[in-house]
Image (spheres, helix red, strand yellow):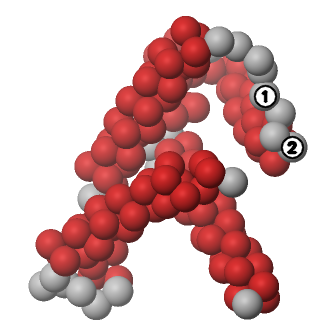
Amino acid sequence: MMIIKTVAVIFTGLSGGIAVGIGFVAFLTVLGVIPRLTQLTKTGEYIHSYEWAVVISVVLASFADLNNYSIPVGAAILIPIGFASGIFIGMLAAALTEVLNVLPILSKRIGMEGMLISLLMALVMGKLVGSLFQWLIFVNY
């Protein structure tokens, strides 16, 4: 039974990491965030600095997350930060889905062309079950 739990945790961790990594790479490359940022701010000569800032911040944030590093602040600070982070992640996911036309492409690739609604409901239910698992079960450990 312990082996099954270990394999499930490894599979879930790798799947989550791959999904987040793919989303981040898609955000940076397909949408061209960094070149667009340098274009808007007219700071094209600093493009390598922008790229390194993104890489270093992702590595440091990953390191802090994996080592359970936290900054002790009160709820008055955490609530607005959590609210803003949730809005950002939701809007980012919606923007990527809208701009990249992800769901129709995904349904074609996996052979579910006529079942786009079923695919969408599976994604929604997966998100719902994952959120409930995190907040109702995993928080108690």
Residue sitting at x 81%, y 48%? 66
From the top left corner, tell me how far across and down residue 26 is, in percent.
Answer: 51, 53
| Mark 1 surroundings within 10 Å by alpha-carbon count, few (fewer than 14), some (14 through 19), many (20 or more) | few
From the top left corner, tell me how far across and down residue 63 is, in percent.
Answer: 84, 42
Residue 7 visible somewhere in the drawing: no
Image height of 129 relative to 4, above or below:
above
Residue sitting at x 73%, y 75%? 10
Residue sitting at x 25%, y 75%? 119
Q: Which mark is residue 70?
A: 1
- Which amino acid does the dot numbered 2 rest on? Asn
Q: Which mark is residue 32?
A: none
Image height of 106 relative to 67, above or below:
below
Q: Secondary structure at mark 2?
A: loop
- Farthest front residue? 140
Image height of 111 relative to 38, above or below:
below
Quickly name the residue at label 2. Answer: 67
Residue sitting at x 65%, y 12%? 74
**Quarter holding residue 105:** bottom left
Q: Secondary structure at mark 1?
A: loop
- Which amino acid does the dot numbered 1 rest on? Ser
Residue 106 visible somewhere in the drawing: yes
